[in-house]
Amino acid sequence: GERGEAGLDFLQAENHFAAALELDPDNLFTRDEYARVCFNLADLEAGPTAQAYWQKSLDAFEAVMATDPKTGLSEASLRESAAFWAYARAKCGQFDAARQQLWLMATLAPQDWFPRYLLAGVHLLDHFFDLVHAALVEDGVLEQFVQPSARDQVADDVKHPVGTERLA
């Protein structure tokens, strides 16, 4: 992808965090940092490469949230990781789960603007998918130009519009 110098730094960081996790898979701080690096790489990439990083980010943030106790991470870091996890869910097509998670976060911390900001992004992603998918179906693009075996992949690519916004 066209990630530039910053992307190369994130790629090196990913490799170092992955190696650290092989040595100590239960290190919560390292897993959280790995999830954040994958999140940023997903945002810098496009297409299937970005989608793979969104999934890695989602999985790593989920592992962070499933770890108990969560020693080593501040409350602010955990809130931010939960928000990034929700956004990664949306980027992986889990719009309802992302919305529910962000609504809960907004309810528990009504003074925090960040969950509401991401909730707006999730609504836009979901709406964008609906609009593009409907246009493709209405125009017959999926039927005319895409072989039946590839239709699901095209629909999946449309559902995951990576690179349409910048978060960081």
Image (cartoon, rainbow, N blue to C red):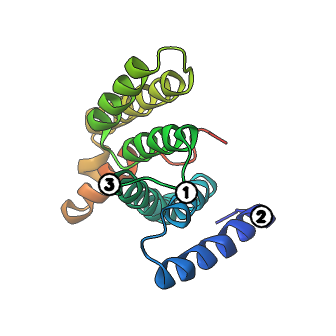
- In primary-sequence order, the first of circles 2 and 3 is 2
The residue indicated by pointer 1 is 42
> Image quarter for residue 16?
bottom right
| x and y percentages locating residue 9 in the rendered image | 74, 69
Say if mark 1 contacts mark 3, CB within 8 Å: no
Q: Mark 2 vs mark 3: give the one in front.
A: 3
> Image quarter for residue 5?
bottom right
The C terminus, quarter of image = top right
Q: Is residue 63 left or right of residue 39?
A: left
Q: Dot 2: few (<14), some (14–19), or many (≥20) neighbours within 10 Å?
A: few
Residue 4 disc label = 2
- In primary-sequence order, the first of circles 2 and 1 is 2
Q: Dot 1: few (<14), some (14–19), or many (≥20) neighbours within 10 Å?
A: many
Q: Secondary structure at mark 3?
A: helix
Q: CA distance from mark 2 to mark 3?
A: 34 Å
Residue at 55% over, 27% down: 114
Does 13 appear above or below 61?
Answer: below
Residue 66 disc label = 3
Residue at 30% over, 42% down: 94
Q: CA distance from mark 1 to mark 3?
A: 22 Å
Say if mark 2 contacts mark 3, CB within 8 Å: no
Q: Nearer the viewer, residue 80 or 52?
A: 80
Does 39 appear above or below 104?
Answer: below
